Image (cartoon, rainbow, N blue to C red):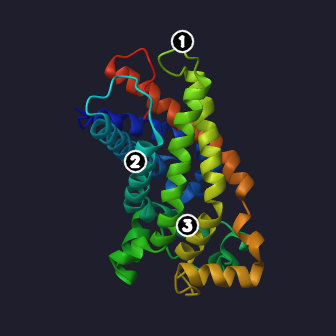
Amino acid sequence: MGNFQLEDFVAGWIGGAASVIVGHPLDTVKVFGFFKGMAFPLTSIAVYNSVVFGVFSNTQRFLSHHRCQEPEAGSPRVLSDLLPASMVAGVVSVGLGAPVDLIKIRLQMQTRPFREANLALKPRVAALGEQPAYQGPVHCIITIVRTEGLAGLYRGASAMLLRDVPGYCLYFIPYVFLSDWITPEAHTGPSPCAVWLAGGMAGAISWGTATPMDVVKSRLQADGVYINKYKGVLDCISQSYQKEGLKVFFRGITVNAVRGFPMSAAMFLGYELSLQAIRGDHVATSP
């Protein structure tokens, strides 16, 4: 029977931590002062990936069991299992990821100039030399809850849902098929090199295709600090298109794809190797 397995969550946490270590210079270092180095991203992203990988793996295992009743070890994964499992992981990811992304965006707004190409906002603090609205991640959470309520932590969640559901489908599914394709038939599991390459390519594909909705999500999450510009996802898309054209939704796509490769490669490699160690296997076990 496809039993619930806690080790997938543990391995996901380790993989998430590995992705933060690799991606920190590429991403979170730009808010180094407020995030106190790697403490906030290491904690939040590691927990986030733990839940996402744990939910995906257990959902996929559950679906495989009910499809085959008695699935054999190492049996090939099929799209009918991978697709719904990826979608469930994408939905669950928003519950944890939306507040984390919101805090990150809000702190970025006041610590560095935000490119108008991404958010169509100029940092008021930087321009006017005013006192920052947030003193750190915890103060940011408290302030948002106090001024906007708990729902304020989920500003932009609808756009994030539209980003992450297809995004995780284009994350896990390419990884599984690429790792299987790279691995010779004589091998019972992908090598660390195959995991690294397939994971990196999956990350580049996922982040590259998620860029348009990521732009919308970021604009919605940045909105509301100094001025409210957008009424929702469709209004944000409409205003952005009218003012800047279609190209605005694809700005940063190269950076996202390039950044997605090493972070996702580290994520999947950390996941697979830690899962081997936990289970005492010598064969990589795909999520």
Q: Nearer the viewer, residue 119 or 209?
A: 209
> Dividing the image into 4 quarters, which one contains the N terminus?
top left
Q: Nearer the viewer, residue 207 or 186?
A: 186
Q: Which residue was labeled with disc 1?
A: 186
Tell me the kind of residue under disc 3: Ile
Determine the image quadrant of residue 10: top left
Disc tally is 3
Is there a contact, CB below 8 Å, between mark 3 and mark 1? no
Tell me the kind of residue under disc 1: Ala
Residue 114 shows in the view: no
Q: Mark 1 and mark 2: span between their CA atoms?
A: 28 Å
Rendering coords of residue 38 (x, y %)? 51, 46
Q: Is residue 217 left or right of residue 94?
A: right
Q: Residue at x 52, y 30 (%)?
A: 269
Q: Which type of secondary structure does the marked residue at label 3 adopt? A: helix
Q: Residues within 10 Å of mark 3 (few under 14, many from 20)?
A: many
Q: Which type of secondary structure does the marked residue at label 2 adopt? A: helix
Rendering coords of residue 96 (x, y %)? 38, 58
Rendering coords of residue 279 (x, y %)? 32, 21
Specify the label residue 85 is tagged with.
2
Tell me the kind of residue under disc 2: Ala
Q: Which type of secondary structure does the marked residue at label 1 adopt? A: loop
Q: Which residue was labeled with disc 3?
A: 105
Residue occupying the far top of the picture:
186
> Dividing the image into 4 quarters, which one contains the C terminus?
top left
